[in-house]
Image (cartoon, rainbow, N blue to C red):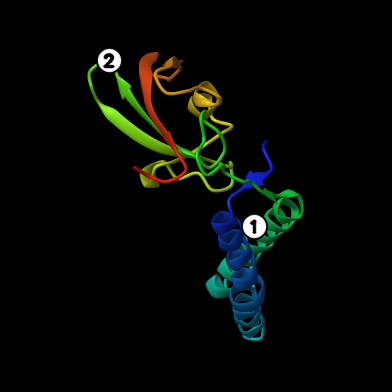
Amino acid sequence: MTNLISAEGLKKLQDEYNYLWKVERPKVVQGVSDAAAEGDRSENAEYIYGKKRLREIDYRLKHLGSRLKHLKIGVTPANPVSVCFGCWVTYEDEEGNVRCYQLVGPDEFDVSAGKISIDSPVGQALLNKRVDDEVTLKRPNGDLNVCITGVSSKRS
């Protein structure tokens, strides 16, 4: 797994970690404590749910803490000549459909926002390609041949 992340992505993960640690976890701990004080814990839904939520928070905090130690902010060239971390790549498929995606680290991908991981099969296929290069994207529903029409440090 790649340890690159954008500055924006790193801030988002740090904000999530801080929120979970300083706001969400203390609130859940207090709820569990209050529910435990009511007596029988075996049929106390608030206590059972609170303990489950606390485990989920602790798992996420452990994961985020581990990732944050290893992540490095990736630098995107101002005028990239080939597809690289952080750049936006535009391609056209065989049917004339145009797509534009930013290559980001695995901790910040969001396909609906146009961000794909450089570790994904599509990201790997596009990496280091240039404008006018033809690329075959391996997908679960079949291969797709595309032609790269643009590489930029900003969304076009």
**Circle on res. 60:** 1
In the image, what residue occupies the spot 54% across and 58% down? 8
Q: Quadrant of the N terminus?
A: top right
Q: Earlier in the sequence, mark 1 or mark 2?
A: 1
**Circle on res. 25:** none
- Number of residue marks: 2
User: Which residue has dot 2 on it?
Assistant: 94
Left or right side of 100 for 75? right
Q: Which is more toward the observer, 29 or 74?
A: 74
Calculate the distance from the C-alpha at mark 1 to the C-alpha at mark 2. 41 Å
Q: Quadrant of the C terminus?
A: top left
* Residue 156 at least partly seen: yes
In the image, what residue occupies the spot 56% across and 55% down? 9
Q: Position of residue 46 (x, y in %)?
A: 55, 74
Measured along the vertical axis of the image, is residue 58 above or below residue 67? below
Q: State which quadrant residue 38 falls in.
A: bottom right
In the image, what residue occupies the spot 59% across and 72% down? 19
Identify which amino acid the numbered label 1 is placed on.
Arg
Q: Position of residue 58 (x, y in %)?
A: 69, 62
For numbered disc 1, what is the local secondary structure? helix
* Residue 42 at least partly seen: no
Measured along the vertical axis of the image, is residue 114 above or below residue 132? below
For numbered disc 2, what is the local secondary structure? loop
Left or right side of 67 for 89? left
Identify which amino acid the numbered label 2 is placed on.
Glu
Q: Callout 2 environment at 10 Å: few (<14), some (14 to 19), or many (20+)?
A: few
